[in-house]
Image: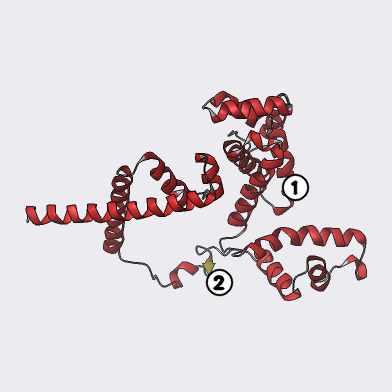
Amino acid sequence: MQANLSSPDSLSTYLADISKYPLLTQPQEQELARRFRQGDLQAGHLLVTSNLRFAVKVSYEYRSYGIKMGDLIQEANIGLMKAVQKFDPDKGIRLISYAVWWIRAYIQNYILKNWSLVKLGTTQAQRKLFFALARTRRELEKLGSGEGNIVDAEEIARKLNVKATEVREMEQRMGGRDLSLDAPVGEEGDSTHLDFVESEGASQADEVADRQEAQITRERVRQALMRLDPRERFIIEQRVMGDSEMTLSELGEHFGFSRERARQLEIRAKDKLKAALCELMAEEGQAQQLSA
């Protein structure tokens, strides 16, 4: 659910609006989820709207990172919608217990991408440390540990079971600021940082050629996918081409067979896709020879 949350007034209006949506009982939730899985979009809409206030609650947990609340709520809503798409009502758990993982994942990914132009966390451990650092520091300061309530890196490291050097490095990266290449250099300000950056990019001709080649490749892949049956095409799209890769277990659940069977079908689908691509390239080569 998208909403304009750019101003405090619009945010207040949004919060008032979503409070009007009634909460669902577990039986109601399960019935709507089953209807949604059968193609009832209105049922999916009701599942989302009834849980929007929870998405806001999770968003507020991340307000200390300097990101606009409206942006955090939008990301939380996207995570909620993703959870509704993947929710299985027959697992015996409430939707929100499942959705909280997706909501946090979307919010955290957004914060990491927007905190700095330079990636703060490239590994799972670094991303975990990024979000745990500020929270742990606040908790230790409230306890009054450390002289003058000043908590050092060693205390935080012991609390999080990491190295103090890792804490200092992350604090340094979090405290850094992005530098605009358009910022003036020198007293007169006639030059900018950009004037002193040597371009390592490809020429315009190379860029055009690369774009054309990429377009040709995308078209070949599209044509090759059309030569697969619907199930094989679904497997390739979800396991290879999707933004959020479906696991083999999820794939098996979707079709109603085992994880091992899903793995075998994935291998076969990939082999058929490769064969189809080879056939297309051979056909293009023959056509070029005939036209020459």
Residue 49 point in image, percent of width and height: 65, 29
- Residue under numbered circle 1: 61
Residue 72 in the image, given as x and y percentages of width and height = 65, 44
How many marks on residues? 2
Residue found 32% across the figure and 55% down from its top: 274
**286 lies left or right of 98:** left
Is residue 197 among the parts visible in the rendering? yes
N-term mark: 2 or 1: 1
Within 10 Å of the Cα at label 1, are there few (<14), some (14-19), or many (20+) other Cα atoms? few
Label 2 to label 1, Cα distance in Å?
A: 43 Å
146 and 186: which is toward the camera: 146
Residue positioned 68% across, 33% down in the render: 52
Determine the residue positioned at 64% across, 42% down: 76
Residue drawn 61% across and 53% down? 109
Tell me the element at label 2. Answer: loop
Residue 278 as seen in the image, left or right of residue 56? left
The residue type indicated by label 2 comes to Glu
Figure quadrant of the N terminus: top right
Residue 59 falls left or right of residue 139: left
Q: Which residue is mark 2?
A: 187
Provide residue 287's location: percent of width, then percent of height.
Answer: 13, 52
